[in-house]
Amino acid sequence: MSECHRCLLGLIALSSLLTGVSGEDDVHVFISSGEDVRLPCNNALHNALQDCTSTTWLYNGFNHSAAVELIGLGIKRKDTERHERLSLESDCSLNIRNISTEDYGSYTCQQWTGVNREKHQGPNARVYLHVLHVSSSQTQISSDLSVSLSCQLYSYPRLSCDDSGRSERIHLFWVNQAGVKLNISDSRYQISSSSDPCIISLNITLLNEDPNREWRCEVTHRDQVKTSVTHTVKSSDQAQTTTPVPNSQDPSTTNTPETSTGT
């Protein structure tokens, strides 16, 4: 692919990103860090599904001021940071293994036709990838002490989680291992949140029975649970673990693509 062609791809992707945060056919995928994800290419040409030589995937988001080409006419770019974790399925959807907080952002699937693949076949198919991640500042804990957990939703363009009535309706919650939302009236729980960026923090004063107990952060979009991350509090002689939990609406999958209806 020529340098001019790559420049053209970048300009088209950037233009499409600037036209609005959400379009009629945009897809939102929520995933927990550490999981694998599949991003659908909803504009794939039926006559090109065998080799995806008409398909180009572009990325825009973390630490990038312009669109980056990940897949060019069915071929992976080897000079990208994600190269080893990327693959194409037979339907030209994009697979990303071991998602990190640096993978969130906007992914655009384009189709190119013509003798030399010089004709852009629109419209673009855009997928927004939102990554849920839990972190803790403590490496060792014991009873009668406290542990602080922070849960953040990484998104680009950045989504706000609040009750302002916006159509996204993004919310973060902390629940216990029984799936019950933590009651802030319990004095040993201190919960604080930020709407932009979307973060909810939990400080727990530990009891003797708390080691090996799970605490889960869930994200809901339009009142539906999309994904969650479980953090297990271990005693001081054990390591703490954080485990992604598949979407509760569909236990067979690890992510939930959702087509946006616009704002």
Image (spheres, rainbow, N blue to C red):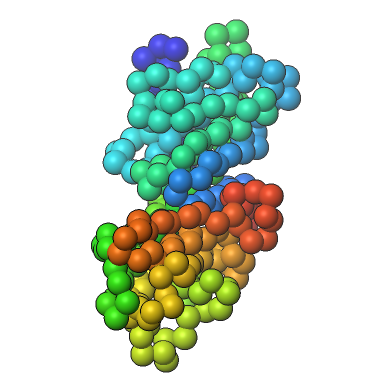
Residue at (35%, 71%) from the top-left corner? Answer: 201
The answer to whether 40 is drawn above or below residue 51 in the figure is below
Q: Residue at x 65, y 48 (%)?
A: 253
Residue 66 % position (x, y): 33, 35
Looking at the rendered image, the quarter that the N terminus falls into is: top left
| Quarter the C terminus occupies | bottom right
How many badges with numbers are in the image?
Answer: 0
Left or right? Give the position of 101 relative to 256.
Answer: left
Q: Position of residue 165 (x, y in %)?
A: 50, 75
Residue at image coords 59%, 50%: 255
In the picture provided, is 202 more to the left or to the right than 225?
Answer: left
Q: Residue, x 44% and y 49% (percent of image)?
A: 33
x, y (%) of residue 179?
A: 57, 73
- The reply to whether residue 17 is visible in this rendering is no
Residue 131 to residue 90: above or below: below
204 and 126: which is toward the camera:
204
The answer to whether one can see residue 221 in this image is yes
Q: Is residue 123 above or below residue 6?
A: below
Q: Nearer the viewer, residue 54 or 14?
A: 54
Q: Residue furthest right?
A: 46
- Residue at the extreme top of the image, as rendered: 115
Corner quadrant of residue 199: bottom left
Q: Looking at the rendering, which quadrant does residue 205 occupy? A: bottom left
x and y percentages locating residue 34 in the rendered image: 46, 46
